[in-house]
Image (cartoon, grey):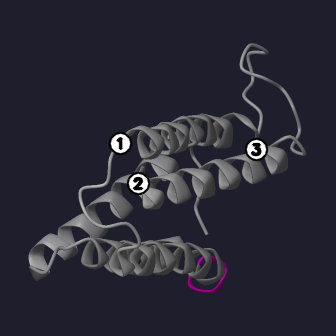
Amino acid sequence: MKKVDVAAGVFTLSLSGFYYFKITKLERRGFTSGELGPEVFPTLIIVPFAVLGGLLFVRGLIRRSETKEGGGGYWGQMAISMLSCIGYVVLLSQVGFLLATVLFLVLFVWLYGARKIWVIAAASIIPTAVIYLVFWRVFHILLP
């Protein structure tokens, strides 16, 4: 059993459940009413997120650890990941989507092993720009 995968899966499932509970408080129009309500897009994100968290949890239960259990590097990396997610939410309301997302992705890309500046820049700027443009041009929603 890989305790890190189990813990990350539990965290992801818990976060998904929390956000799904929050989504249920939004106005409901559904997928079939002809007019999409505010709950549709968050639901389209949360459901796959929960499925992936569940798969990670199951994989952690099934898979054998290649290293000794309790490897401190994984727990530290997971703690930094969780704290940076909280920091991202706080920073989002302070500096806006573009800057907060780029900084968040720079941290994550570096945390998971990228050290080349061009890789870090591309992996943080391109997804941020694509998400922003899709929401702005396709959905006509301005992100904060």
Residue 91 is situated, as x and y percent measured from the top left of the image, at 59, 83
Q: What is the C-alpha distance between the residues marked 1 and 3?
A: 28 Å
Residue, far front: 68
Q: Is residue 51 left or right of residue 94?
A: left
Density class for disc 3 (Cα within 10 Å; few <14, some 14-19, many ≥20) is some
Q: Which residue is mark 2?
A: 2
123 lies above or below 35: below
The residue lying toward the viewer, choosing from 104 and 17, is 17
Q: What is the C-alpha distance between the residues marked 3 and 2?
A: 27 Å
Density class for disc 1 (Cα within 10 Å; few <14, some 14-19, many ≥20) is few
Which marked residue is nearer to the observer: mark 1 or mark 3? 1
> Mark 3 and 2 residues: CB-CB less than 8 Å, in contact?
no
Q: Residue at image x 62%, y 76%?
A: 86
Closer to the N terminus: mark 1 or mark 3? 3
Q: Which residue is mark 1?
A: 63
> Mark 2 and 1 residues: CB-CB less than 8 Å, in contact?
yes
Secondary structure, mark 3, is: helix
